[in-house]
Image (tube, rainbow, N blue to C red):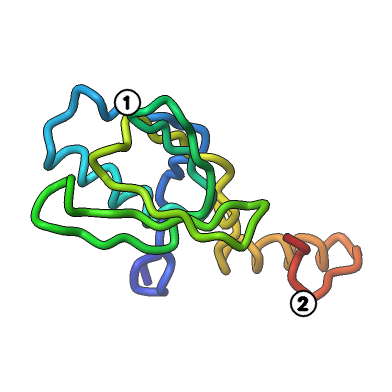
Amino acid sequence: MSGAEAGHHDQPASLQGTAVDLSAMDEPSRAAVLEKAFDFRGDVTLGLADGRTVTGYLFDRRPGKDLASSVARLLPPDSEQRLTVSYADVRRIEFGKDAAHGKSFETWVKKYVEKKLKGESASIESEAL
């Protein structure tokens, strides 16, 4: 039985630690990068047209007919306030720490079995975030 048949999938590469300059991209490319930021499982930092930067977890986006009518919504790490940013204002995206990278079920089982085989204590409790 192959890994795919057994339900095992290679973990996709994480965007963690990368930065993308959107300023020279066309609209479809910029929108595609913003979609990837929405799928990212950690905080992003957005560099805006007015020079400000905002950091947070991108939890929602509302695509419109173009960049000017599309918005992203972020949860800052230090506030309950929700920020709304127009796609048209985003010039740069920096991807922070991916909270889930390397934490697939298969990885957890492998580590659990390795600890048990070594006679070490292994728990089914999740790690602290």
Tag shown at residue 124: 2
Residue assigned mark 1: 21
Q: Quadrant of the C terminus?
A: bottom right
Residue 95, given in percent of the width and then of the height, sits at 48, 39
Residue occupying the point 41% across, 74% down: 6
Q: As displayed, is residue 62 above or below residue 70?
A: below
Res 11 seen here: no
Q: As displayed, is residue 80 above or below residue 53?
A: below
Whether tag 2 and tag 1 are in contact, CB under 8 A, the answer is no
Residue 13, given in percent of the width and then of the height, sits at 42, 44
Q: Residues within 10 Å of mark 2 (few under 14, many from 20)?
A: few
Res 116 seen here: yes
Please name which of the two marks, 2 or 1, marks the residue nearer to the observer. Answer: 1
Residue 33, given in percent of the width and then of the height, sits at 27, 42
Residue 50, given in percent of the width and then of the height, sits at 37, 28
Residue occupying the point 65% across, 68% down: 109
User: What is the distance, in whole Å, between disc 2 and disc 1 at their CAs?
Assistant: 42 Å
List the single residue furthest toward the front.
50
List the single residue furthest toward the bottom.
124
The foreground one among 13 and 6 is: 13
Q: Quadrant of the N terminus?
A: bottom left
Q: As displayed, is residue 108 above or below residue 41?
A: below
Going from the N terminus, do you reach mark 2 or mark 1 first? 1
The amino acid at mark 1 is Asp
Element marked by disc 2: loop
Residue occupying the point 43% across, 67% down: 8
Tag shown at residue 61: none
Q: Residues within 10 Å of mark 1 (few under 14, many from 20)?
A: some
Residue occupying the point 23% across, 40% down: 88
Left or right: residue 56 versus residue 37 is: right
Element marked by disc 1: strand
The amino acid at mark 2 is Ile
